Amino acid sequence: GSLVVNYPFDDDEQGIAIYSKSPDDAVFQRLALAYSKENEKMYQGSPCKDMYPTEYFPHGITNGAQWYNVPGGMQDWNYLHTNCFEVTIELGCVKYPRAEELPKYWAQNRRSLLQFMKQV
């Protein structure tokens, strides 16, 4: 897990971790930023210092392929084959939080979700 919004493309022709710009890159960045700006910890860009001390996402967003390469991912497939603009929102450093922690996740992401919906 992490705390970041990642956007297409998640794959590139070379199969390495390098920025892979989609034709709608500016729109994807805007959508990702709309979400991350409302989540203070995400927007700071270094959410999982204990687990990944060198990982940094400027403004809490990243191009998927620049982070790590995912060939054949749903995010890219939906964009290319159905014209669906999809981003992946990683909500925290712990993949499986305990049930009692879920209200904290809601509090951290409520405004982000509302802002994201406003982008329509």
Image (cartoon, helix red, strand yellow):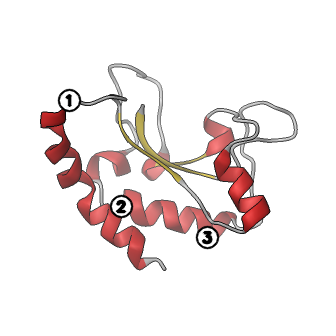
Q: Which mark is residue 27?
A: 3
Closer to viewer: mark 1 or mark 3: 1
The quarter holding residue 70 reads top right
Q: Residues within 10 Å of mark 1 (few under 14, many from 20)?
A: few
Q: Earlier in the sequence, mark 2 or mark 1?
A: 2
Q: Which mark is residue 98?
A: 1
Q: Amino acid at mark 3?
A: Val
- Horizontal and vertical percent position of residue 3: 39, 41
Q: Which mark is residue 38?
A: none
Residue located at (21% from left, 52% from top): 106
User: Looking at the image, is 34 positioned above or below residue 2?
Assistant: below
Q: Amino acid at mark 1?
A: Arg
Tell me the CA gap for discs 1 and 3: 34 Å
Q: Residues within 10 Å of mark 3 (few under 14, many from 20)?
A: few
Tell me the CA gap for discs 3 and 2: 15 Å
Tell me the CA gap for discs 2 and 1: 25 Å
- Horizontal and vertical percent position of residue 76: 71, 51
For disc 2, the marked residue is 37
